[in-house]
Amino acid sequence: MLYVPRKDFEDLVARALDQIPAELAELIDNVVFRVEDWPPPGEHLLGLYQGIPLTERTTNYVGVLPDTIWIYRMPILQICDTPADVVDEVHITVVHEIAHHFGIDDDHLHELGYD
């Protein structure tokens, strides 16, 4: 398995976020991004979005804690063969989880090649 120090991995996540087109980045609202080493026990995930997607927010959406997007370092490193693979997988995972924030489900993401 590849080794990427946590700080370097966090930098990859930040770079992936910087690559989000400005017109989309401006729409990301009330979201916290976190890097964790592992997903919750029993889960086989590269990333996770928890929150209320933009498509489901109503006028009652006030005083709500931020949505959270987790990117899981170790599972990503386990599936990658090269440092370039890690960069690509982090980018794909970040985009995938942001898409959930925009209300795009896994089936549509699969159609778009982001699974």
Image (cartoon, rainbow, N blue to C red):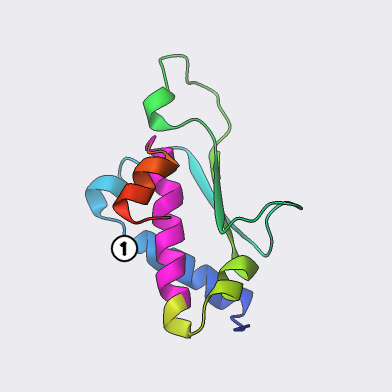
Answer yes or no: is residue 26 visible: yes
Q: Report the span colored magenta.
A: 86-103
**Residue 48: image location, x then y, percent:** 56, 48
Residue depicted at 48% across the width and 75% down the height: 86
Q: Position of residue 50 (x, y in %)?
A: 56, 39
Between 92 and 113, the residue placed more toward the observer is: 113
Q: Quadrant of residue 56?
A: top left
Q: Is residue 110 magenta?
A: no
Query: Where 39 falls versus 89 (above or below)?
Result: above
Q: Nearer the viewer, residue 50 or 82?
A: 82
Q: Badge 1: how crowded within 10 Å, few (<14), some, or many (20+)?
A: few
User: Is 94 part of what is drawn in magenta?
Assistant: yes
- Where is residue 31 shown, x and y percent of the image? 49, 42
Quadrant in which the C terminus appears = bottom left
Is residue 69 visible in the rendered image? The answer is no
Above-or-below relation of 27 to 84 = above
Q: 40 and 24: which one is in front?
A: 40
Q: What is the three-letter code of the residue carrying label 1?
A: Gln
The answer to whether residue 40 is left or right of residue 108 is right
Label 1: which residue? 19
Give the residue displayed 68% in from the left and 55% down from the top: 39
Magenta region, main secondary structure: helix
- At x 61% / y 74%, what residue is drawn? 78
Q: Say which element carries label 1.
A: loop
Q: Quadrant of the N terminus?
A: bottom right
